[in-house]
Amino acid sequence: QSALTQPASVSGSPGQSITVSCTGTSSDVGSYNLVSWYQQHPGKAPKLVISETDKRPSGVSTRFSGSKSGNTASLTISGLQAEDEADYYCCSYAGTITFGIFGGGTRLTVL
Amino acid sequence: QLQLQESGPGLVKPSETLSLTCTVSGGSISGSSDCWGWVRQPPGKGLEWIGSVYTSGATHYTPSLKSRVTISVDTSKSQFALKLSSVTAADTAVYYCARHLWTYKWYFDLWGRGTLVTVSS
């Protein structure tokens, strides 16, 4: 099964909002509210920022939010800060054969 | 608090078996989750789930690696392990172990720092 589709890069200025999309199929994103999002700074391990499509783990800034429409999930970061500059990966449950797949990743640049 | 640490050789020869161990400290491997997983990231590329193991010993693997992967758990040592056989240069990656919330969830909420494994003669 192919990786979920994410834009290679997005950018925004401090204080602005950006949205990263994650497009799958009716076999993964479209069928389950089990999309998670991870933030990864260079040379560091990924960090969970959104679970189960729209749940924000304890300790994650309220500026991060998740949503889904059809086969596309989205991560929105509001009030962009310099520290948000990182790579972001989505991941979705995909049933009892594939189980789970990641997106290709999106590099966020804060201008 | 709970921490995960990967360990194992950083260099493996082609056709040999890659072996890594993840040690869970600061808490019980059985008490904090029923599932633990491995995720890898080739240099400059994205994340790929390899497989996961329940503390019961049951396993699930990604289909593309299933024929070469074995994941096991030793609850007495608070460790779980990854073996990947017949490796090639394409298996060169940073390998992460992670706590895997599976049932009705499917996400990784706690990660090790990762260990780079290079496949080269």
Image (cartoon, rainbow, N blue to C red):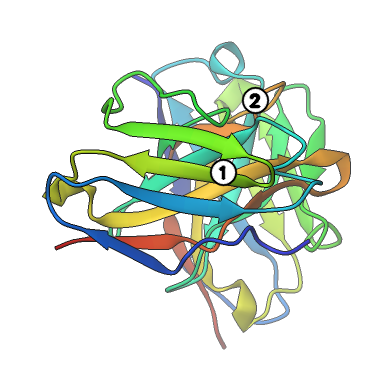
Q: Which mark is residue A73?
A: 1
Question: Crowding near pointer 1: few (<14 within 10 Å), some, many (20+)?
Answer: many
Instruction: Please give the name of the residue rendered at 62% of the width and 21% of the height, measured from the top-left corner.
Output: B76
Q: Is residue A74 left or right of residue A109?
A: right
Of residues B94 and A14, which is closer to you in this image? A14
Of residues A90 and B14, which is closer to you in this image? A90
Q: What x and y, as percent, mark residue B90?
A: 62, 78
- Disc 1 chain ID: A
Instruction: Please give the name of the residue rendered at 52% of the width and 61% of the height, measured from the top-left corner.
Output: A6
- Disc 2 chain ID: B
Question: Crowding near pointer 2: few (<14 within 10 Å), some, many (20+)?
Answer: some
- Above or below, B53 relative to B101: below
Q: Amino acid at mark 2?
A: Lys
Of residues B100 and B4, which is closer to you in this image? B100
Q: What x and y, as percent, mark residue B10?
A: 46, 67
Q: Quadrant of residue A68?
A: top right
Q: SS for tag 2?
A: loop
Q: Is residue B8 visible?
A: no
